[in-house]
Image (cartoon, rainbow, N blue to C red):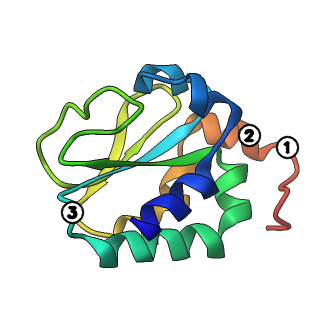
Amino acid sequence: MGHRLLLILLMLSPLWVNAQNLEDFRWQYRLLVINHDGQRGDMMHDIVAFNLDFACEMRERKILVVEYINGMHENLNAWPLDEQGIWLVGLDGGIKDYSQDTRILERLFDRIDAMPMRRSELLRQSECGT
């Protein structure tokens, strides 16, 4: 519960309160969707640490972390896939990557930076000094 609360606090945005459907984030945010059985404390610890270590890069790429437990979220509609793991959902709402574990984090920024929408964003100066 502590990891979940920390993750939610880190990821709160003005849209979060009004969002009820993942579609509400389309064209505004990329989503890193985690669906687990509630027993994956090590995975959530790694994601929280990654988010803290790369907060600027996550913000710059407009990435929100959304946690589902057994496909359910207290504010959003149910996650449509039964599998557990981590999905990268693009600005267009499409699934761009998937991993059963946190290995997706190793390729997250490269994967996003190769996307056409991100390439146009990269034409602007980086906020993170990279």
Can you identify the residue that label 3 sits on? 100
Where's residue 121, x and y in %? 74, 40
In the foreground, 73 or 84? 73
SS at mark 2 in the image: helix
Based on the displayed image, in which of its 4 quarters is residue 29 positioned? top right
Check residue 25 in the rendering and tell me which mark sits there, or answer none.
none
Where's residue 57, x and y in %? 69, 61
Check residue 124 in the rendering and tell me which mark sits there, or answer none.
1
Residue at screen point 60% across, 51% down: 11
Can you identify the residue that label 2 sits on? 121
Which quadrant holds the C terminus?
Answer: bottom right
Q: Compute the Cα span from label 2 to label 3.
A: 29 Å
Which quadrant holds the N terminus?
Answer: bottom left
Going by the numbered disc 2, the residue's amino acid type is Glu
Q: Is residue 59 visible?
A: yes
Q: Nearer the viewer, mark 1 or mark 3?
A: 3
Where's residue 69, x and y in %? 25, 50
